[in-house]
Amino acid sequence: MWTEDCSIKTCVNGEPKINRTCNSTKPECDREEDLVSYTNECGCESMECNCECKVYGDPHYVTFDNVHYSFYKNCTYILVKEVIPKHNFGVEIDNYICTEDKSCPKAIIISYNKFKITVSTLDQLTLTINNRTESIPYNLNGFDIVKLSHTSLQVYIPKIRTKITARRNRFVISIPEQLFLDNTEGQCGSCTRKKIGGCRRPDGTVEKSTCCPTAALDWKVPDTTKPHCAKDPTNVTCPTPTTAPLTTSPPGPCCKLCELLHQKPFEKCNKNDMETYDKTCEDDCHSTNICSVVCANLEAAASECQGNCVEWRSYTNGLCDLDTCDGILTYQPCQMETDDRCENNKVILGQSLSKPIEGCFCPKGMKSSNNDTCVHTCCVDHSGRQRNNGEKWQHFSDNCTILECFSSSVKENKLHCKNQGNCPEPQRKWDEHHCCYECVPTGRCETIEYNNTIKKDNCIAEVEVTRCKGRCDSSSEFDFITDRMSHDCKCCEEVEQEERKVDLICNEGPNKSYSYIYIKKCKCENCEPKM
């Protein structure tokens, strides 16, 4: 027995027997919510454990190994870096000052192979790849990037099964343990099962969780757009833990949102998890009084609610509403797959998701088109007209190509012309597509082409020859002037010709040259005896 090409093979009576099986073993993850499904290289549905890092609010961090801390600096920092480069993957975060003394995340920078993807969610959602602005969706160079709403998108890298979700004031990075276990570092910490309960500096020093905001300073990267960051200190000694004084500032209008974490929308969620987000929510509402920053805490809490879809936005009196969905797009709070979409007249299947996401989606059975509308099929002709399944039409520049809308995608069918001779246009009888024709004599005097085989003394050759053929007007009548019959006879005769030569292939001896007359033009002429 051996395994080859995703199949288990055995030898039975000298013949190989193939059994293709899919391994459905369920791995044990540290947390149930880290268990995700994916389609492996053999096309089988498999399960694996993921590591997830969140950055949200002003900003707060939840590392791969579930350490929570807050970090308020406004430079650019390494979130994820491979300790030993294996997949050429890394992530950086670009923070900015959103209040007097607090920062918020505004962009995430993803490096993979030779590509650098920057997703900005500050004023509007923008995507650049290698410093070039790109439209969304984007499905090239090993990336599958789809828009979830006006202010959010998801980047999926199929080869390394990695997903990055970017929303205003919130970023989530999900990587598979199978590829990254014990091989990541940065502000997102280590994707590991060896919980260290703290944070690691670039030199490998492990600090307690209370020192994570200080250790995070060391992951700063050079950024020419922020010259002030060059002076920001690194290798700072961990401060002595102190109890933060309770805030005495009056609650802002956004603070009531935090109360939802203990109310109906989140009632099925783990209470301990909600306490963590309640603390960061209260911190953000008192320090920033920016509702979108506070809402990011509720978003993060909803995603943490294992196995439950939390429909919380309708309880916020419009303070946390997503931007209005365009056209017939509708808001869905708990979608388990992204929309199928149209690209170059073909259907690109949506991504299956391990956790529900929210956003603007097409109605069931419809696909997302490139201009943020929903369509029933991805079939569009050259004039921009939408085509339905089963419809056929001709290519605008090639009469021999018939296009068909099949399974919502455009399928090309090439017409093939058989035994098509060469004849002048008047003799051509075209098919309905004006692609293929058959030669049909008109009956008038004209040149007819045909093939002939010449045989001379055991020598042979196939040549194209012509003949004059067709009707010519002739008449016979009594002439009253001459008092006798008058005859007007016309014959279809050659009026232009040339001599051609061909080599006859001989069975014995050398080839022989043979000359013959090729008629180039025919015409009705007076019938006269030919010498």
Image (cartoon, rainbow, N blue to C red):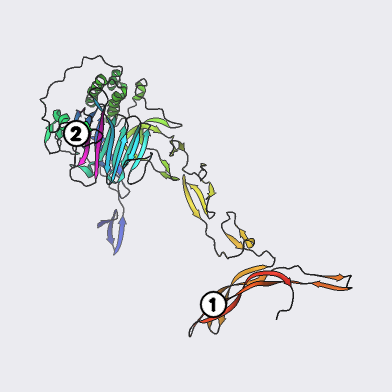
Residue 267 in sight here: no
10 Å neighbourhood of mark 1: few (<14), some, or many (≥20)? some
Q: Does residue 148 lie above or below 288 as drawn?
A: below
Residue 197 forms part of the magenta stretch: no
Identify the residue under disc 1.
Answer: 502
Q: Residue at x 52, y 57 (%)?
A: 415
Task: Report the front residue among 356 and 452.
Answer: 452
The magenta stretch is 70-98
Residue 90, percent from left and from top: 24, 41
10 Å neighbourhood of mark 2: few (<14), some, or many (≥20)? few
Q: Rounded to the nearest whole Å, what is the CA distance between mark 2 and mark 1?
A: 85 Å
Q: Nearer the viewer, mark 2 or mark 1?
A: 2
Q: Name the element at disc 1.
A: strand
Q: Residue at x 29, y 25 (%)?
A: 293
Q: Amino acid at mark 2?
A: Ala
Residue 283 in sight here: yes
Q: Which mark is residue 230?
A: 2
